[in-house]
Amino acid sequence: MENITVIQLANKIQSEADAYLFMESIRWPHGPVCPHCGSIAAHYFLKPANSESRKTRTGAMSYRRVWKCKDCRKQFSVITGTVMHGSKASLRIWLFVIFEMAANKNGIAAYEIQRKYGIANRTAWFMCHRVREAMVRSNPSKMLGVVVADETWIGGDPKKRHANQRPGKQGKTDKTPVVSLIDATTGEVRSQVIADVTGRTLRKVISENVEMAKSTLHTDSWSPYEAIGADMAGHGAVNHHAGEYVRQGISTNKVENYFSQLKRSLDGTHHHVSVEHLPHYLSEFDFRYANRKLTDTERMYRLMGRVGGRRLPYKRSLTR
């Protein structure tokens, strides 16, 4: 697979018709697949009158390449049933946004997408959330082996707020707790917003994502992990309060490094992320971290392989 730069991508997709051909080469390397029935029969291409574009019922010209399934007899295109389905933004812009979100280590803000591609801000915001939807790993199997776990809090420092906006009780915080699990072998990370950092909550997250009886847990000395570790194949902990960060291969450095990148990016790129939409952003950073050893091109191709079957209506993007 050749490594593609932004300039090369621009040269490959100089028109909307080029964008559809490029998308088809990625999603359908062995020929079209019907998104309605899953058929891989020799579907036939509905060639436009002028060989490039067709007039829609509104009178506008469309460059969408339309196919017809020989089995279910329904029409479809390469974006049917994907996160791009029903979007009025051009496929060229979609491809550039997908490339940038896959390649930019610190992410990219919706306002920057708006400025660079000349689209409305709510369109840019919705596009970014659709791409983040594609970054969510569907039906993941449970982690197995050595799993590193830790929790952190996302949000501004209450001490820097006006006195009447700070949490009422001393020692309390209204930051949002997040727990992350990293497979020490594969590098996969799974992050989740949680209500609190009690043993019950942490156990639920770990049991849903890890084969506990066959895995070893590495954590810090937070007391709830002791009871959870007792139900696992092994448990190793380091005591940060005593200045201990690595002991006989046991460490939480992997997840600490992930949190460092996550917080710097949220603060520096997005500046503020609401609690409601924080899961979207966690999916984005989980994807990039898990695929950090791939090239930008490989990461984009992997992301393109996930866009199918994930339509995200605008209303659901507001509440997910």
Image (spheres, rainbow, N blue to C red):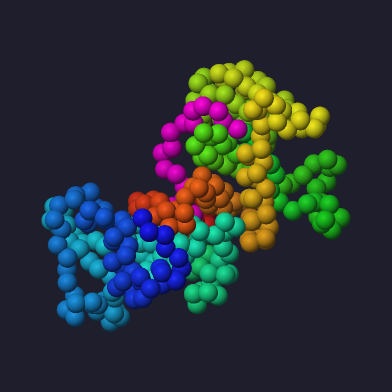
Residue at 16% x, 79% y: name it. Answer: 49
Question: Relative to residue 21, is residue 180 drawn left or right?
Answer: right
Residue at 67% x, 48% y: name it. Answer: 260
The location of residue 111, given as percent across then percent down, is 58, 69
Q: Determine whether 247 is above or below 320 in the image.
A: above
Is residue 88 visible to the viewer in this orientation of the structure?
no
Q: Determine whether 279 is above or below 234 in the image.
A: below
Residue at 57% x, 30% y: name it. Answer: 147
Q: Determine whether 180 is above or below 266 in the image.
A: above
Task: Please name whichever residue, 188 or 297, is drawn nearer the observer in this view of the structure.
Answer: 297
Kindly indicate the quadrant of the structure image that contains residue 190: top right
Q: Determine whether 216 is above or below 77 in the image.
A: above
The location of residue 107, given as percent across then percent down, is 57, 59
Is residue 10 visible to the viewer in this orientation of the structure?
yes
Question: Relative to residue 114, is residue 305 drawn left or right?
Answer: left
User: Is 257 inside the magenta-drawn segment?
Assistant: no
Residue at 83% x, 46% y: name it. Answer: 168
Which stretch is magenta? 131-148
User: Is 144 inside the magenta-drawn segment?
Assistant: yes
The location of residue 218, given as percent across then percent down, is 63, 28
